[in-house]
Structure formats: structure tokens, C-alpha cells
Amino acid sequence: MKKLKKINAVVIGASGYTGSELVRILLNHQEVNITALVANSNAGKEIGEIYPQFKHFNLPALQKLEDVDFLQDDVAFCCLPHTTSQEVILVLAQNYPQLKIIDLSADFRLDDVSNYEKWYQHKHEAPEIQAQAVYGLSEINRDKIKNAAIVACPGCYPTSALLPLIPLLKNKMISEKSIIIDSKSGASGAGRNLKQGNLFCEVNDSVKAYSVGVHRHTGEIEQELSKAFGAELQVDFTPHLIPINRGIISTIYVDLKKGFNVDDLRNCLKTKYEDEYFVNVIDGEPAISDVVGSNFCVISIFEARTCGKAVIVSVIDNLCKGASGQGVQNMNNMFGLDERTGLEFAPIFP
Amino acid sequence: MKKLKKINAVVIGASGYTGSELVRILLNHQEVNITALVANSNAGKEIGEIYPQFKHFNLPALQKLEDVDFLQDDVAFCCLPHTTSQEVILVLAQNYPQLKIIDLSADFRLDDVSNYEKWYQHKHEAPEIQAQAVYGLSEINRDKIKNAAIVACPGCYPTSALLPLIPLLKNKMISEKSIIIDSKSGASGAGRNLKQGNLFCEVNDSVKAYSVGVHRHTGEIEQELSKAFGAELQVDFTPHLIPINRGIISTIYVDLKKGFNVDDLRNCLKTKYEDEYFVNVIDGEPAISDVVGSNFCVISIFEARTCGKAVIVSVIDNLCKGASGQGVQNMNNMFGLDERTGLEFAPIFP
Amino acid sequence: MKKLKKINAVVIGASGYTGSELVRILLNHQEVNITALVANSNAGKEIGEIYPQFKHFNLPALQKLEDVDFLQDDVAFCCLPHTTSQEVILVLAQNYPQLKIIDLSADFRLDDVSNYEKWYQHKHEAPEIQAQAVYGLSEINRDKIKNAAIVACPGCYPTSALLPLIPLLKNKMISEKSIIIDSKSGASGAGRNLKQGNLFCEVNDSVKAYSVGVHRHTGEIEQELSKAFGAELQVDFTPHLIPINRGIISTIYVDLKKGFNVDDLRNCLKTKYEDEYFVNVIDGEPAISDVVGSNFCVISIFEARTCGKAVIVSVIDNLCKGASGQGVQNMNNMFGLDERTGLEFAPIFP
Amino acid sequence: MKKLKKINAVVIGASGYTGSELVRILLNHQEVNITALVANSNAGKEIGEIYPQFKHFNLPALQKLEDVDFLQDDVAFCCLPHTTSQEVILVLAQNYPQLKIIDLSADFRLDDVSNYEKWYQHKHEAPEIQAQAVYGLSEINRDKIKNAAIVACPGCYPTSALLPLIPLLKNKMISEKSIIIDSKSGASGAGRNLKQGNLFCEVNDSVKAYSVGVHRHTGEIEQELSKAFGAELQVDFTPHLIPINRGIISTIYVDLKKGFNVDDLRNCLKTKYEDEYFVNVIDGEPAISDVVGSNFCVISIFEARTCGKAVIVSVIDNLCKGASGQGVQNMNNMFGLDERTGLEFAPIFP
């Protein structure tokens, strides 16, 4: 079911890491034209000036948002920081009804704007858009995404945790009361921002836990798990910064519900993801290097040492399946393409 | 209470990473003479040939074990692989009663030889020595170590987990039923062995969980926690390999016993370690880089998101406090020196 | 000029890094069927068992060389170590006249077998094949490669050095007497072999020069530069090992011939590579990250501080343009495809 | 010849990497009291707040320059950026005649202020101090340093290049006309400044050449080499940024003067540095890991492939021998201590 005409796509926020990852993917996508690259503070420059890896590609120059003619576009990817994103999307949604919007920020991920305001300490400026937004976890919300006008792509940590946990909670195989998610992420998750903690010498040769118990992605994880479970729940989530560029590994500790063992859980996940190209449930020990540069999520589940527990390990590339890759997967779905289109490239190793 | 004469020390297994770390520390220790360096397969070479960082130091050549005259020595550090270590120590203990032995392998860490045989799949060949061995967690077993003839230095992962957990269990502040230890270690923990998984390209740019639920250090952690608690308990322990040379960070999830909150736990740890030079309980977020190259352990404790839980973060340098540094700390204690002697160097950062 | 039928390709030596890089590229190549993967010591396993990144792809199991039916194949990529490669290729060439052979080893790179024997200390076992082999530097030897039955792909270091130097020597713009090539390579260049020097802890946090003045790639560099210049010449080449997985940067010092300045050299290179997709001459400072994961070579040239000299900087991905990518580029040429087919993916950054 | 009283030392600019390295070294130095730590923008904080590795040490709080009573101090280490350094030192020198000053910036390294103004594009504000300053390359200028009131410690790159080159030029063993210095430095050389190019993801997995032919350290290298040679000379110097925290490796290409071979050069260096503790001339291939965390410089010299050339490889820790370690070595000299005092610690590896 191919479209005759290519999809015209604009990338807003092209000077960040998720923006550049989108460009990398879309360049390889045979059904997409990149019509515009928006980067207000770098407007006028070629993208090759700020991302030399694109110097040799035929791409539009960076421009200001106000200079883009969105009438020609079919889809806008929004890679702006949260709070900025909602301002821009509000305008786009009001003025360009033909435009499908795929947001990679946190601005439209939380259904309840008061929940957003609690986690992000910012008054939501587009609650009417929020009402239309679909949470873009591709394998879980496929049907809703298909018809959505605006898709809020999940955060990187949530993607790694939700894919294994949602089916298990839906099937009441694990307790909702003691879910521990210990995640480790590469430095690109922090973006291209100038903070001392992001400097090479500060990240290299070290690992640190941060935002212990209070990280913003907790809200998103709890919202989606609560939906799957059918009632409110809370989780313990600890993110760590590791000295790699790309990738997340989440080690998740769960309590089995009576009557289930680890094999049951594994079978549940294998069945759920049997026909999913991008989610693979394996028997061994996943490593981040199994997925870097690709849109895959690899999951494994192990019997814990203590009775009645299981340990789940899940790996993704935070910039790809955890951000831009999942965004393109959603776009494919929204435009009636095979979800795999333009995303079948293998991980890069070593 | 300084000795008039320096301590004569021999390092057995000088060609591994813990052996070389011992040499680094002892070179800087004003009360120690290194009398011999044993490395059977490299015997005859200078240590500078296999560890160029020592080329410029005045050190004895590597020799075979059989060529060492242990009669002149006061202490032997044994940095051999497990199973080899017990063979050697059995002979030393039987022939050189004057010699204090500090073992860095796993061979004498488990009180019960049948427990050893279960975890290490090897019949213990020196059970009579096991009976005399003291588990060398310096801050916890100081009094026993002082008079021990043989000290079994704790594993690296156990050191990072036991220091925060023992006081909390002893004081019945946390449940013994749901202790989760999620640890991340640098590659030097695997030693200088030729395994594909230790190659640069395999470790770099990745993180993986391994031996999930079945790692051998579990036995040692459970033994010491059970002693502290006063009854048998089990833990869930997941080690991860991270792309750094040195350092461990353990993120530990515990359930508070009724009547206690996180402040109580923090106070318990602060009180316990108030006068300990090498163990520091802080309020912020510890990073591995806070301790690399030093004998410090830094611990912090956080309120978890879910009710009744706490998250403990603990960092050490696996080769130093997690191995050779703690070995020297124990030696100081065994010879009546201030425990800090030769170990007061600051971490190296960046 | 597309072929109606896909090209049937076999990868011999699929368990090494260049083998796995070939698989990564060919999976994405729309005109190629991978018919067989040869890995004698891993025969019977799935490639996903030794390279987990391929677990989710539909690929043939690894097999022994003797079990492959080469009659069905159009091309064989040979990713074996030198000396093994020539044995295998000799048999293939004698028995399968329809088969085009692309060798990634050093075995057929040196025109003169006595030169091979000097650099590789091994008697050449297939001199008659050598006579037919074409040196596969794509942009330089395109016409010969097109009709070759066997192509010897250049080494990684030589590729990075020859692309800028050949046009300058051909045009007599630089002296042949004082060419200094200071190269820095990621660890994948050493392959997946178990050597102490390749362990993570040995490579990480360090850089070393090795084989100073005597590295085997020197022979290959000198051969091709001598051809370009029209007379025998020698170069000073120093390789360094750097703590990254992929990538080479070569910093090259040359003496200008009288009458030429740096602008002339830059123009020469820009003109030469104007229509080349994979070779880009830029004005800024190239970084390895500009090319990782891609088949690009980026070159820049700078005025030196001292009079009459220039500094050239050249970067490639050693596994891609420096090995498997160039191999596929040559295959495209040999089979009448656009050389870019399957190779247009952008570098991966960060 | 020990002083009875400890040396009172103040560190100005304690919040940068060279400042923190000084603190690390001085903490271990038995003849020094750290009386004050100056960091204007962090004044009032404990140093442990900005460098957690020092949390457990007894150190003065950070303070403003104006709040320091320099009358009590014997020596001031100045770790400020260039241009700021000269302002501060001018005031100190005028007001505290008892105070010896050891500057780690570039401000007093160039004898001729017009040369300074050319390389640093800044008018020198303290030419009268310049006249008294001694270039603090410890092994070369020992006698002058001994009696200096102000010592300008060499840059990191110059230290690595000058130590091998000065003796060879002094002895007219190499040509002054074709010295090429290809250097590779870890990221700490760029300091703790917030620049995009210093972010983890930008440095990791890459190497780049920068400031090709125009790096400011060139002026300093040429000045000292010209003095050694006895006439003005120029060099080609190319710095590279490598993904490690600490360490420099300089690969240096020289032309032999007629009558000399590589053995002669090696002997010259071996003789020159025979009695020097910190400079070691070896026969093998030096690696950065041979010196990290230490004050050593390791040098090796190789026969080049082309006739009449030699390749010299030199490694140092840029923060230690390339900055703060050499600063302390000079202090020892200035105060009549054994130069090795407080600096005999071994490199840290792995």
C-alpha cells in the first residue's frame, strides 16, 4: 500500500541529537522528502556546518520556523525541548490541519495536564492539543497512532521499560506493587547542551546515578503501566549515566503473581512480540551493542535468585527506538506504509 | 605504634591486575619492603616488561614460587586465581608459621567449605586453613583481622554492597527478604585474561548484564549479610560490565522495616562510619569518579518513589578498596600500623 | 543498468569484524542475496550466536568452506587472515571460473610476490592468481576493477593515505622524498583476536605508537605511490592505536614542489574528487566522527607552519571504506551497478 | 636539606583541572601546607562541592583572591587562564616579595612580550614581571629555576616535545629545518570549560586534528628549541584531541645531521637523562598508560623507514608532568627540597 507521492517532512529542531538522528534515518527512507530543517539559532547555516556527517548530502539549509511554508508538508517532526515544543505545536495544529505532527519532546506524553505540570513544573499551554495526542509506543498503541493527528513519542527510558512490562501487567502476571527499574543510559540522552556534567572528562571513566526516585520519566512510565494494569500504580526508577554515546539498558525487578513462573512470563512476551519486527525476546544476555544504530529493542527475562521474582533486561538505542526511530516507525504507520520502511538497517558493531 | 623494622612483603601473582595494583600501593607505603614478586609464567622477567608503568622503579625481578625464601617475609599477598590460591596457601601456612597471609582470591571467603564447593564447583583442598581464615572486610571485622594469620579479602562487588547493608541489617532497619543489588563494574574486574568478551571492541560502547541471579559473589554477600542479620537470607544480585577500567557502582533497593524512615537509615550509616577514614556517607549522588585510584567507599541513601523503600548507592574502586587497597588496609591492621598508612592518596580525577 | 537477477554473494570469514561489517552492508543492499556465510571454526552456528546484532535477520547459518556450493554464486568476499586467504582463493579461482573474488586480506595487494614475501615473511602460494589481481582502490583503479576477476581490496591505513597522496604525486606537486604519514586507528583494525594488547583495559585510556617504521602496510602504500609517481619511493609511516572501535585519521606531512602552494594542492584534490560521491575534500578540520559507519573519506589540506610544507588530514571508517564498504563499492563496479548502491547511508553520530 | 617548617602554599584557580591536580599532589606532599584555595566564582563553597573526590579531605574552603592573606604564604601556584594570570601575578609580585610564584598559564612563558602578543592576541600587562620569569622545564632549566622568584611552567604539549628535542638540537645531531611534532592529547587539556567540542558525545569515539599549523604552543616550542640550537628555527606542530581524560603522546619526526645515526641520538638522550628520575629513555614503544597519574616522561627513538630520519615518541600525563606535577617539581627545587618529594607515586594502570 505505497503512496504514489513521497511524504513531505519537516524536521523542527534539527540541531539537537534527536534531530540529527531523524535526518540520518529519513535520508535513507525511500518514501520521504525532507522539505525543511528548522533550527532557529543556526538559521542560515547548512546542517553540514553543525553536523559534519551531513556535509555530503543534499539537504535544505537550516531555517527559522517562521520561514517555513508548512502548507506543502505532510508531517512535522518536532525535536524541540519540552515547553518550547508545545508552543510551536499549538500554532502548527491550529494553522495546518493537513499536517500530521510527531513530537519527540515530553510535552504531550502525559494525558492529564495537571500531571504534566507536576512533573515538569510548567503550566501546560496547549491542553486542547493534549486531548488529541496519542502516546506513540508503536507496538502497543498501533491502532490509535494510525489515525492520530498528533503523536507524542515516548521517552527513551520509558520505551525500554514499557515494552517488557506492559504485557506482563496486562496479563496480571506480575505484582503492580514492587516494580524496580534500574536504567543506564548513554550521554546522548542529555542532548547537545552545555552543562559541566556533560563534558567528556566528567562522563568518561565513571558512572553515576542521578535524579534517584524523582526523574521526570517516572510520570510517563507510571501512566502507561497504570493503563495496562487497570489501576494506579507507582514504580521505583533509577537512571544512571554511562560513558557511551548511545544506548540504554534497563534491568527490571518484578514480583511474580502467584501461579506464574518465569517461563510463563517469557512465553507471554514471546507471544506478544512474535510478529513484531523491532521487538525481540531472546534467551541470552542482551548487551547495548546488540542494538546500537538500529530500531530494535531486545528483551530477556531471568529467574531471580530469591523466590517469586524475575529479572528483566531490556536494551534499545536511545536515539533510535528511544526517539527518532520510533518517530519514523509511527510516521510509517500514520501514512499507511509498512512500519519497517526505512528502518530495517542492522545495528552497527563493533 | 610503629614497627622499627619494615614489613617484608611478597606479592604472589604479580602479573594480574590486582597484583600490579598491590605493587603500586606498596611502592608508596613507607613501612613495607617488597622482597619478592612471584609470577610463574613470567619468571625471569622484570615486572616492567609486563607492566611498563613500573619500569622506572626499583623492584625485584619476577620469580617462580619455588624460588622464594619465605623465611625472610612477614606477609604474603596472594593474588592468584581461585583454586590455585588454596594450593599455594596450604603449603605456605604449613611451612612458614611466621608468615601472615592475605588472600585476594575467593578461596577462603566462604566459611563453610560445602558452600564454597557449591558456588565454585571445586572441592576445597584446604579446609583446615579455611577454619582459621577471617573475612577481611576491614571496617566490619577489624578486631578479628588484627589477630588473624590468614585474611580472605572480600570480593569487589561484596565490598560495595556489604559496607552499607551490614549496619542496616544488624540494626533490623531493613527487611531481609527483598534486597536487590544492581551492580556495575569496570572491565578490570575480569582480570587480564584473554577472553573475547574482554576485548576492547566488545566492551567499549556497550553495557551488559551477566550471570544474572547466579554470580558467585552472591554466596559471599549472603553469608556476611546473614551473619549481620542473625539468620539465613538471600539477595538478588545483578552484575553489569561497563566500559571503564576501574570502579564499581552498586545501586541497592531495600524495604524499610516498620518504624524506620530513610533519615533513620542515613543516620545509622553516618554514625557507624563517622570515624572511618575510608567509608564516607554523603548526601548527594556518588559517582565512580569520586573514588577511582583511592581506597574510599562513598555511600548515599535516597528515599524511593514507592512507599517504604530506600535506594542506596555505593561506589568503590574495584582494584583498590575492592581488592588490593583493602588488602593493605588489613595488613596495616595486622601489623599494628595505623590502617591509613600508605593509603591516604586522593582519588585521581579527571 | 540494473541486473535483472540479484547477485549471489558468499562471505568467507564471516566471524571476523570485516566479515560482520560486510553482512551489515549486504543486508541493506537491494541487489544482493547472501547465499552462504563461511566460518570454519563456528560452522553449524547461526551468525546471531557470535554476532547478536544479526539475531533478528534472516541469514544462512555459518558453514564450513567445503560445504558451500560455489556454482550458484556470483561473487565471493574473502575476509580471511593473510596466508589463509591465498590458499582458499587459489582453489576458488581454479574451480569456479564464473566467480568474481573480492579479497579483503593482504594476500594479493602486492604486485610482486617477492615484495609480499619480504613484508609478510611467507612464501606466496598463488603467484599465478597474483598476476590477475587488481588493487581495489575504487576511485583510482575503477577501470581495471570493472573487468577484474579478482580484486585485492586495499588495507585500511593505505586507503586513508593513498586517496589524498596519489593525485598529488601524479601531478608532481609534492616531493617524493619526504612523505610522512602519521596514522591513528581504532581497535577494530586489529580484528577479533585474543591478544593481551587488544583487551579493553589495555587499549582504553591510552594511545600507543606501534610497528614504528616497519608496519606491513608500508609496502602497499609505497607500491601504489611509486606507480603514481612513476618511480620507486619510500615513506615514513607510523600507526597508532587509539581507544575507539572504528575509524582512522591520517595526518600527512608533505613537501611542496617548487611552483606550487597549498591552494594548488587543494584544487588538485577538489578537482580529482569533484564527481566522487565517497571522497570529499573539505576546508575545515575533519574528525573521525564525520565518517563512522559510512563509506566516506574526508580530506583536508592545510598550510604548514614551516615554509614549503603542507599538512593533509584524511579520515575513514577502517571497517567500511577501509575494508568491507570499499569491497562492496568494487562489487558494484564489477557487476555494472552504480557504485553507490547499498552504500549511501549516512555516518552515525553521535 | 629539609626545611624545618612546612611550605605554606596557596592554589589560585582551584576549580580548574590543573588546580584540582595540584591539590591532589600537594595533599600527598609531606612538606607542604595548603593554606588557601582561591576560586572567585565558587568562593564560599567547599572544594568537595565542585570536586567530590576531595570531600573527605581536610582542606580550606574556596575563597576570593582578595580575601587571602598572602603574607603567611611561601608559594602561590597560579592556575588561572592566560591574561587573567598576569593581572593577578602582577599584583602579587608587587605586594608580596617573600612569595615565590609558580604560574601554570601561558602568560610568562614567552621571553619576548611582542611574541606573546602575537600568539595570544593580547597586550602583555606585566612585562616587568616577564623579565624575571624563568621557563620552568625542570630538567633543562634547573639552575635558573632554583633561584627564580617566578617560574612559568611549560605547556603540556611543549613539555612532551622539548624534553627529547632540546638535547638533540643542543648537540647538533638533528636538522633544525624539518622538525615535525604530531601530538595527541586527552580532553583534560581543554580544561573544564563549557564548549560544545568538549562534550562527551563529541569527543568520544572520535579523534580530530585542530589548530593545524597555528596552535599557540608553537611559539613556546620554537622559543626553547631556538635557544637550544642557538638560532631561530620553526617547527610543524599538529595537535589532536583523543578520547581519553589524561595523557599526551607526541610522535616527532627529525632529520639526522650527517655523521649521526639513531643509536647516537638514543645515547645522547640516555646520557642526558641518566640521572633524571622523571625522564626515562626506553627501547620499546611507549604508551600513554605508562605514565597516567604520574610525573614521568617516557621517551623512545626509532629508526625511520626513509634514510636519514628518526622517529621519536614521547609520553606524559598532561595534567601532571605537563602542568601541576612539574609545578611541584619546580617548587621542590625552589625550596631546596629533593625534586622528587611528594611526586614519587607510580602511574595508575589499568
Image (tube, coloured by chain):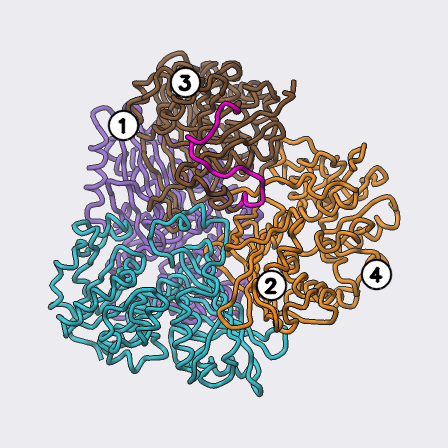
Chain colours: A cyan, B orange, C purple, D brown
Comparing marks 2 and 4, which lies closer to the viewer?
2
Q: Is residue A70 magenta?
A: no
**D57 or C220: nearer the viewer:** D57
Amino acid type at circle 4 is Pro
Up/down of A231 relative to D160, above or below? below
- Image coordinates of residue A335 in percent, x first then y, are 22, 76
Give the alpha-carbon distance from disc 1 to disc 3, as whole Å: 51 Å
Asked if marks 2 and 4 touch (Cβ < 8 Å), the reply is no
**Residue designated by label 3:** D94
For residue B127, the mark is 4
Amino acid type at circle 3 is Gln
Q: Is residue C50 visible?
A: yes
- Name which residue lies at 30% across and 73% down: A113
- Image coordinates of residue D325 in percent, x first then y, are 52, 30
- Name which residue lies at 43% across and 25% down: D309
Give the alpha-carbon distance from disc 4 to disc 1, as whole Å: 76 Å
- Name which residue lies at 32% across and 42% down: C314
Give the alpha-carbon distance from disc 2 to disc 4, as whole Å: 41 Å
**Residue designated by label 2:** B264
Comparing marks 4 and 1, which lies closer to the viewer?
4
Comparing marks 1 and 2, which lies closer to the viewer?
2
Amino acid type at circle 1 is Leu
Give the alpha-carbon distance from disc 3 to disc 2, as whole Å: 55 Å
Using the rendered view, name the quadrant where residue B124 is placed. bottom right
Q: Do labels 1 and 3 share a chain?
A: no
**Residue designated by label 1:** C256
Q: Mark 2 lies on which chain?
A: B
**D148 or D290: nearer the viewer:** D148
Up/down of B329 relative to A57, above or below? above
Up/down of C145 relative to A74, above or below? above
